[in-house]
Every structure is written in C-alpha cells, then in structure tokens.
C-alpha cells in the first residue's frame, strides 16, 4: 500500500504538490505509488531554475530500470529551485519520495490552479487504494 500524505495534493499522472514556507512556491515530486511502479530510479533529467512551464507540460524525465517516463508540471509556473541532490543519487526518489526525493520548487502562476488537483482521498481512489 502506497503512502499518501494528508498535506499534499496530486495529479492523475502521479506528481505531488506540497506547499512551502514561501508564499506562492510549491515543491513537486513523484508519489510513492509512482516510484514503486517505476522501480529503481537510475537517472533524472530536470530543468534549470528560471524555466517556465504551462500546466501539465513535461518538465523533465525520470529513468528507471523498467521505463523512462515524462514528468508533468502540475500547474503553470516558473522553476525557482531544482533538487541537485537527486542528480547524484536518484535512488533517493525510491527511498524518500516525499522528503529528500523532491524534484523542483515552482513559483505558481495562478494559485487557484492548485484547487483543481486531487485531494489525498481522490488520489487514493485513482490508484485503487
């Protein structure tokens, strides 16, 4: 059974969004369910700070032993920080997807877009939990 923290919102494509202490900035990563489905993560390709993405635009790729998958930006915004730690050790995504395995921090263009994401309960139903 996958961990689904109560303080996050989710996409149907298995990204999570977590509020930060900075107003308008969120942390984005992949869910525990997604890392489990992918298997051992061996490489992540992430954008540089300053890059801008529209809602559900691919912002990078994640490569695992089983597959390569695109990463989708849950809401429109600008990258303000990238987790450089996972470039050197992408296995952190498997061990701690909601902590050290985060991927990007994003300044949200329209905060109301966050309201359209899945609640923990809705995400659990989406993955059949």
Image (cartoon, grey):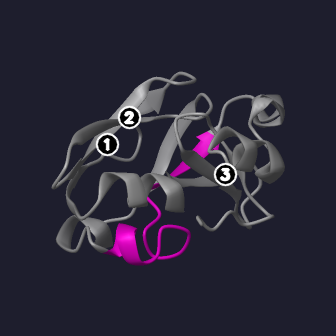
* Res. 109 in view: yes
In magenta stretch: residue 125:
no
Q: Position of residue 55 (x, y in %)?
A: 58, 23
Q: For residue 25, which numbered disc appears in the image?
A: 3
Element class at badge 3 = strand
**Magenta residues, start to end:** 92-107
Q: Residue at x 53, y 21 (%)?
A: 54
Report helix, strand or loop for mark 2: strand
Decide which of tag 2 and tag 1 comes sooner along the chain: 1
Asked whether, in this view, residue 23 is left or right of residue 37, the answer is: right
> In the picture shown, does residue 83 fall above or below 37?
below
Does the rendering let one see residue 31?
no
Q: Nearer the viewer, residue 126 or 18?
A: 126
User: Residue tagged by mark 1?
Assistant: 47
User: Residue 59's mark?
Assistant: 2
Real-space Cα separation, disc 2 to disc 1, in angstroms = 6 Å
Give the mark toward the camera: 2 or 1.
2
From the viewer's perspective, is 81 left or right of 114? left
Residue 128: image x %, image y %?
Answer: 66, 45
Q: Residues within 10 Å of mark 2 (few under 14, many from 20)?
A: many
x and y percentages locating residue 107 in the rendered image? 61, 43
Q: Quick check: marks 2 and 1 in contact, CB under 8 Å?
A: yes
């Amino acid at each position: 059974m996958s961990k689904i923290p109560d303080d996050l919102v989710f996409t149907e494509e298995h990204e999570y969004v977590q509020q930060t202490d900075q107003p308008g900035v969120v942390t984005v990563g992949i869910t525990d369910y997604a890392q489990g489905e992918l298997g051992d993560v061996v490489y992540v390709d992430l954008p540089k700070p300053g890059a801008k993405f529209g809602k559900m635009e691919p912002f990078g790729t994640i490569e695992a032993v089983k597959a390569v998958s695109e990463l989708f930006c849950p809401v429109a915004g600008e990258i303000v920080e990238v987790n450089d730690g996972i470039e050197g050790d992408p296995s952190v995504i498997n061990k701690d997807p909601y902590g050290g395995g985060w991927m990007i921090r994003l300044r949200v263009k329209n905060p109301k877009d966050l309201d359209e994401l899945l609640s923990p309960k809705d995400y659990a139903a989406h993955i059949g939990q």
